[in-house]
C-alpha cells in the first residue's frame, strides 16, 4: 500500500509501528505487535485453560502482567470465589507477582492508572472492554477476550489491524457544573455507538490540553461506547507530571504529525454547552440535561461509581454538593470509589462521612452496581441515574429497568432531589 | 473449516450488545454447557431452547458491542452455531468469535434479506451469502488471510499450540 507514504502519521500509527518493529504502518494493515502491558481481571480465569491447551509453559514476561480483580470483590458468590481462586493459583504457578487482591484492590483500569503500569508509547491490552481508558497516557490500550489473552501471555504479542484515526478537537471553557463526562456524552451523541468501530479516537485541542489526567481517563474510557479500539490523548507535561513518580517502565512519548491523515475530524466547542445525559437504552441516546429535567423523571436508585467516574476528584465534587443535604426519600444512593487508595483518601477527607450522613451507602471499591452482576441490582421498571458508562437493556439488572448516564455532579443532584436534576440548580 | 456453510437462520436486530447475549449475572459461569442455557435470554429468548447445531445467526449492525466477555461466543460455540453473519460487528466480539473458530462474517445488507426460519448458504471463499428460500444474496469482501488461517486452524488455541510446538521442535525458547 502506498497510501501511507508522503504524509505524516497519527499517534496510533506511530505506536503500532514501534510495537511491530516497523518504520511506519498504514491503516488496514495487519501487524504483530509486541505487548508492553497485559492486564487481567476476573475474566482472566478463562485465560488459564486455553493457556495450558496451547502448551505454553511460562508467561512471556511476568513483570508486564497485572492481575486486578474488581467485579466481585470480595467474592459475593461461590462462582466468583472460584474465579478468584483460579487466578491466585495461576499467578502462583506462573510466578506473576503483580496481583492486586482483596485489600489492595480496585477497578482494574484505575489500578493500572494510579500505579503507572501504562506509559506513553505503550501497547497495552486487558480483558476488559474499558481498557481504552489507558490510552489517555498516550498509549494504544485495547480490550481483548480471555483466549486472546492466553496467546498474549504465551507469546507477548498479538495481531492488530492498524486503525484509522478520528480526531476529536475540543475548544472552549466548561461552564460551571459541566464536566469531562458531559463532553464525552456529547461526542457519543455525534459519533454514535458504531461511529468509531475498529478505529482510534484521538482527543486534542486547548480544552483537552487543560484537562487533568482523571478527566482524560473519563473521556478515553467511553470511547469504548463508540466502538473504538482505543481512545487516546497525546502525552504532554500533565501526563509526565502524573507519571513521573509512578511509571513502571520507560516512556516512549509520541504525538501525531501535523500532516497526519485522519479519517474524520469532529470539532466541538464546549463554550455554553449544558450538562448532557444518555437516556435509555443506549449510551448514544444523548440529550441536553435541562430537557430531561423538565420531564420530572423520578429515580429509584443513584450510582456514583465505575471506571468512568469514581476517582477522588469525582467523589470530592459529589461530596461538595452532598454536604448538608439528604438523599431524597425512597432513593437508594450507592457510592463506590474506584480503588482502595481512593477509599482511603475519602476516609481521610471526610467524604465517607458526608455521604453516609446524607443517607447514601458508601461501599468498598469495585465495579459495584455498574454491570448488574454483583450489587445494586435493579428490579423491573426501576429507574437509575448513574455515573457509569452503559445503559443497555439489562445492564444493571432487569431488562425493563431504565438507566440514565450522567456526570458525578448530576447524579448527586439527582440523589438529593429524587428526580433527574441539573447540578447547576443546586446551591 | 467448511467451504460452504448452510443452516437455519435466526435473525436479530441492531446493537445487540453482549449484555443482551449473556447478562452480567451469568459471568461467573465457566462451563459453556451451562452458559448456553442463558444465551440471548434478553435479545432472543426462544433461541436457547430451540436452537440446533448448525443454525446461523443473522444480525443487523454493531452485533456484540459492549463488554469483552467471551462468554457470548463461548455459549454460541457450545450450541454449535454454524456461523454468525451481520451487517457489522463490534471489534472485541469479532475477535473473540474468530479466536474460538466460529465463522464470523461481515456482510453489509445481509440482515435485510433474511427472516427467522429461512435457510442461509454461505460460500466463504466466493464471498456470498444466499437466502435459499428467496434466492436473494449479498456479497462480502474476502476474509483477510490472517483470519482465514485462524479459522482453518480451528481457532487461536490450535494455532498457538502449533506455533509453540514447532518452536520447541526447532529448539528455540518461546
Image (cartoon, grey):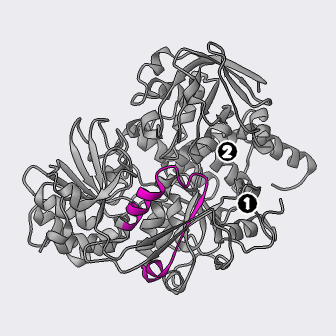
Which numbered tag is attached to residue A33?
Answer: 1
Tell me: B35 left or right of A341.
right
Image position, residue A157 (x, y; %) = 72, 57
Q: CA distance from mark 1 to mark 2?
A: 19 Å
**A1 or B148, nearer to the observer:** A1
Image position, residue B67 (x, y; %) = 48, 46
Tell me: B1 left or right of A266.
right
What subunit carries mark 2? A
* Residue at the outermost right position: B170
Residue wearing tag 2: A51
**A367 or A390, nearer to the observer:** A390
Q: Which residues are magenta?
A: A183-211
- On whether disc 1 and disc 2 are found on a single subunit, the reply is yes
> Which residue is depicted at the point 49% across and 84% down?
A238
Displayed quadrant of residue A231: bottom right
Number of residues whose C-alpha sits closer than 10 Å to that of mark 1, classed few (under 14), some (14–19) or many (20 or more): many
Image position, residue A264 (x, y; %) = 58, 63
Which mark sits nearer the N-terminus, 1 or 2?
1
Viewer-nearest of labels 1 and 2?
1
Displayed quadrant of residue A101: bottom left
Asked whether residue A360 is in view, the answer is no
Is disc 2 placed on a helix, strand or loop? helix
Is disc 1 placed on a helix, strand or loop? strand
Q: Is residue A354 magenta?
A: no
Amino acid at each position: 500500500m502506498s497510501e501511507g507514504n508522503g504524509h505524516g502519521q497519527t499517534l496510533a500509527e506511530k505506536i503500532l509501528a514501534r510495537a511491530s518493529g516497523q518504520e511506519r504502518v498504514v491503516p488496514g494493515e495487519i501487524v504483530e505487535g509486541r505487548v508492553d502491558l497485559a492486564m487481567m481481571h476476573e475474566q482472566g480465569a478463562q485465560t488459564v485453560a486455553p493457556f495450558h491447551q496451547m502448551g505454553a509453559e511460562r508467561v512471556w514476561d511476568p513483570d508486564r502482567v497485572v492481575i486486578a480483580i474488581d467485579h466481585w470483590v470480595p467474592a459475593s458468590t461461590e462462582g466468583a470465589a472460584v474465579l478468584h481462586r483460579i487466578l491466585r493459583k495461576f499467578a502462583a504457578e506462573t510466578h506473576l507477582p503483580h496481583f492486586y487482591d482483596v485489600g489492595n484492590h480496585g477497578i482494574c483500569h484505575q489500578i493500572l492508572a494510579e500505579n503507572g503500569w501504562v506509559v506513553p508509547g505503550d501497547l497495552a491490552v486487558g480483558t476488559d472492554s474499558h481498557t481504552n481508558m489507558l490510552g489517555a497516557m498516550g498509549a494504544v490500550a485495547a480490550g481483548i477476550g480471555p483466549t486472546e489473552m492466553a496467546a498474549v501471555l504465551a507469546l507477548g504479542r498479538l495481531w492488530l489491524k492498524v486503525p484509522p484515526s478520528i480526531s476529536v478537537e475540543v475548544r472552549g471553557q466548561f461552564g460551571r457544573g459541566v464536566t469531562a463526562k458531559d463532553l464525552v456524552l456529547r461526542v457519543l451523541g455525534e459519533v454514535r455507538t458504531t461511529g468509531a468501530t475498529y478505529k482510534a479516537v484521538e482527543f486534542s485541542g486547548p480544552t483537552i490540553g487543560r484537562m487533568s489526567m482523571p478527566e482524560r481517563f473519563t473521556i478515553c474510557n467511553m470511547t469504548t461506547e463508540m466502538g473504538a479500539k482505543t481512545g487516546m490523548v497525546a502525552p504532554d507535561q500533565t501526563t509526565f507530571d502524573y507519571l513521573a513518580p509512578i511509571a513502571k517502565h520507560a516512556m516512549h512519548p509520541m504525538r501525531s504529525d501535523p500532516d497526519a491523515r485522519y479519517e474524520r475530524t469532529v470539532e466541538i466547542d464546549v463554550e455554553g454547552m449544558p450538562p448532557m445525559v444518555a437516556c435509555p437504552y443506549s449510551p448514544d441516546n444523548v440529550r441536553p440535561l435541562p430537557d430531561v429535567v423538565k420531564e420530572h423523571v423520578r429515580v429509584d436508585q443513584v450510582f456514583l461509581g465505575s471506571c468512568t467516574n469514581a476517582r477522588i476528584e469525582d467523589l470530592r465534587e459529589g461530596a461538595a454538593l452532598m454536604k448538608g443535604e439528604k438523599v431524597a426519600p425512597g432513593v437508594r444512593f450507592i457510592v463506590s470509589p474506584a480503588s482502595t487508595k481512593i477509599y482511603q483518601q475519602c476516609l481521610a477527607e471526610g467524604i465517607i462521612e458526608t455521604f453516609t450522613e446524607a443517607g447514601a451507602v458508601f461501599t468498598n471499591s469495585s465495579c459495584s452496581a455498574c454491570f448488574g452482576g454483583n450489587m445494586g441490582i435493579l428490579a423491573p421498571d426501576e429507574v437509575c441515574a448513574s455515573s457509569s458508562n452503559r445503559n443497555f437493556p439489562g445492564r444493571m439488572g432487569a431488562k425493563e429497568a431504565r438507566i440514565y448516564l450522567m456526570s458525578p455532579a448530576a447524579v448527586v443532584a439527582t440523589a438529593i432531589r429524587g428526580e433527574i436534576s441539573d447540578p447547576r440548580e443546586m446551591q | 473449516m467448511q467451504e460452504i456453510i448452510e443452516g437455519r437462520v435466526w435473525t436479530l436486530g441492531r446493537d445487540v450488545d453482549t449484555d443482551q447475549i449473556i447478562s452480567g449475572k451469568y459471568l461467573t459461569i465457566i462451563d459453556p454447557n451451562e452458559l448456553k442455557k442463558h444465551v440471548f435470554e434478553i435479545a432472543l429468548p426462544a433461541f436457547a431452547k430451540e436452537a440446533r447445531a448448525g443454525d446461523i445467526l443473522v444480525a443487523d449492525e454493531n452485533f456484540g458491542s459492549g463488554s469483552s466477555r467471551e462468554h457470548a461466543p463461548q455459549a454460541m460455540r457450545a450450541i454449535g452455531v454454524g456461523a454468525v453473519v451481520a451487517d457489522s460487528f463490534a471489534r472485541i466480539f469479532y475477535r473473540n468469535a474468530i479466536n474460538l473458530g466460529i465463522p464470523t462474517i461481515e456482510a453489509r445488507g445481509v440482515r435485510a434479506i433474511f427472516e427467522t426460519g429461512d435457510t442461509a448458504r454461505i460460500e466463504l471463499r466466493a464471498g456470498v451469502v444466499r437466502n435459499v428460500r428467496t434466492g436473494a444474496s449479498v456479497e462480502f469482501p474476502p476474509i483477510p488471510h490472517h483470519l482465514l488461517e485462524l479459522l482453518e486452524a480451528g481457532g487461536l488455541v490450535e494455532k498457538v499450540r502449533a506455533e509453540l510446538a514447532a518452536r520447541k521442535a526447532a529448539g528455540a525458547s518461546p
